[in-house]
Image: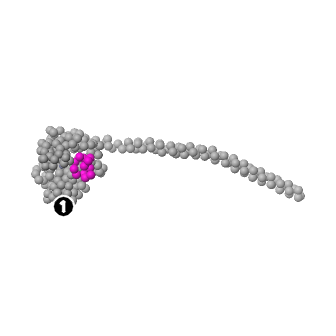
Amino acid sequence: MEKGYRGKLITIIILSLLILLGLIYLKFFAKPSPKPAKPTSTPAAETATATPEETEEPTPEVTTTPEPTPEIVVDLDSNDSINKFVNKSYTIDSGYVPSDLRKVNVRSNSDQTLRAEAADALEKMMGAALDEGLTLKLLSGYRSYKEQVSLYNTYLNRYGKAKTATMDAYPGGSEHQLGLAVDLGNVSGKCELITCFVEYPTYTWLHEHAYEYGYIERYPQGKESITGIMFSPWHFRYVGIEEAKRIHDSGLTMEEFYGRTQ
Ligand SMILES: [Zn+2]
């Protein structure tokens, strides 16, 4: 009986040892199996590093997708276009006279004309300002090439060549010849064509609302080197409501907005 028990004990011990050995073997076999898994993880890391390269490629596709710009066709070069781009480098033909000039029915120093569309917009704009108790005065609208020449010479004698070059008087290079630009001021005449015009609520209102009527502030402060013209808070350019909103929202000058230089 005792021998039988011993025999059973021995077999149990042997079996348990075999199980232990088996477990040890399994552990040894199990270890190499994750090892090959590691190299598979490293190429995964390589592919992970490769993916940013792939994501870099689609990004230019994203930047090319906004195609609204070519959809909006703006004629910057025809004399009769309300978006005609003008500065000292992009001049207007000396013989150009807009065909649809009309007298503007607003407060002004003397009779002033503008192209019909710009006149309609100005009347609405000045009317809206008046509704808020702000009385504006139109100082200058359309100016012929001849008038530009005489204005330029007047300034030249008064201020010299350097300062005159920064004033909106260059013959052929002034938007006033398009019949699409206006100089506005206080009805009181205070700070007329002087930068202190900015201190008045009339200017603040124009600064905030002119674009809603299709007019933009054409020669802003801090952009003198880009426009080539001194800060002129009284000068507004008509470009149509949609384009005025786009330019206004961009915070850019026409030079920057259209990628043109002076
Ligand atoms: Zn002007």
**Residue visible at 67% across and 48% down?**
30
Q: Is residue 230 magenta?
A: yes
Residue 81 shows in the view: no
**Residue visible at 17% across and 53% down?**
193
Image side of residue 64 versus residue 258, left or right: right
Image side of residue 158 versus residue 84, left or right: left
Q: Quadrant of the N terminus?
A: bottom right
Secondary structure of the residue carrying tag 1 is loop
Q: Is residue 75 above or below residue 119?
A: above
Image side of residue 69 versus residue 203, left or right: right
Residue receiving disc 1: 133
Q: Is residue 239 magenta?
A: no
Residue kind at label 1, given as amino acid type: Gly
Specify start and end residues of the magenta stretch as a single range: 220-231
Find residue 55 and report its horizontal and vertical position in percent.
Answer: 46, 44
The answer to which quarter of the image holds residue 204 is: bottom left
As rendered, which of 81 and 237 lies closer to the eye?
A: 237
- Secondary structure mostly taken by the magenta-highlighted segment of the chain: loop
**Residue visible at 72% across and 51% down?**
23
